[in-house]
Amino acid sequence: MYKRYKYTVRSNKQIANLVYEMILEGDISYITKPGQFINIEIEKFYLRRPISICCYDENTITIIYKVVGEGTEVLSNLKEGTILDILTGLGNGFDTRRSKERPLLIGGGVRNSTYVWFVQSIDKRREKANCCARF
């Protein structure tokens, strides 16, 4: 189930070449599992941009994204205080209850940011994960 909300950009900073971290403030009630994503409406673009959720807390979502086209270029230039129309709580996410004693996470590129939340959730159960990542 998803919900459409207005979110406020709290920060948007470059963390690597063409890679940005954005913190959005708003309702997170429909975010329930690691691996979910949001869809961001960008002014003057027909299609929303799907971006994986890196992590979240009581009222903020953190996303990591790479500038790969005109839409993400616009995102990279958004300033603190900008209001965005976002569909949230999308995707089935990872079922962390199905993870074994030492899950193996394999991924590549900026999408590895989704593993942050997954590893945090299994760490609460005192499990460990093996990660293999390539950028």
Image: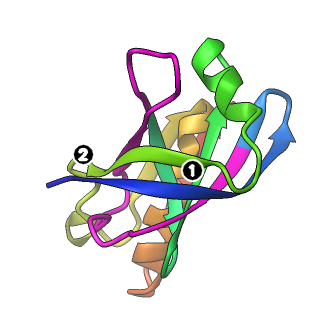
Residues in magenta, as a range: 21-49
As helix, strand or loop, the secondary structure at mark 1 comes to strand
Q: How far apart are marks 2 and 1 (CA)?
A: 23 Å
Residue 39 visible in this rendered orientation of the protein: yes
Which image quadrant: the C terminus? top right
Nearer-the-camera pick, 110 or 52: 52
100 to the left or right of 74? left
Residue lying at 43% horizontally and 44% vertically, measured from the top left? 85
How far from the left and from the top, in percent, is residue 43? 52, 25
Confirm whether residue 134 shows in the render.
no
Q: Position of residue 18 (x, y in %)?
A: 79, 27
Q: Position of residue 131 (x, y in %)?
A: 56, 52
Q: According to the image, label 2 marks what residue? A: 91
Question: Which residue is at 23% across, 62% downward?
Answer: 95
- Near-viewer residue (130 or 91): 91
Crowding near pointer 2: few (<14 within 10 Å), some, many (20+)? some
Q: Which mark is residue 19?
A: none
Identified by mark 2, the residue type is Gly
Q: Is mark 2 on a helix, strand or loop?
A: loop
Disc 1 designates what residue? 83
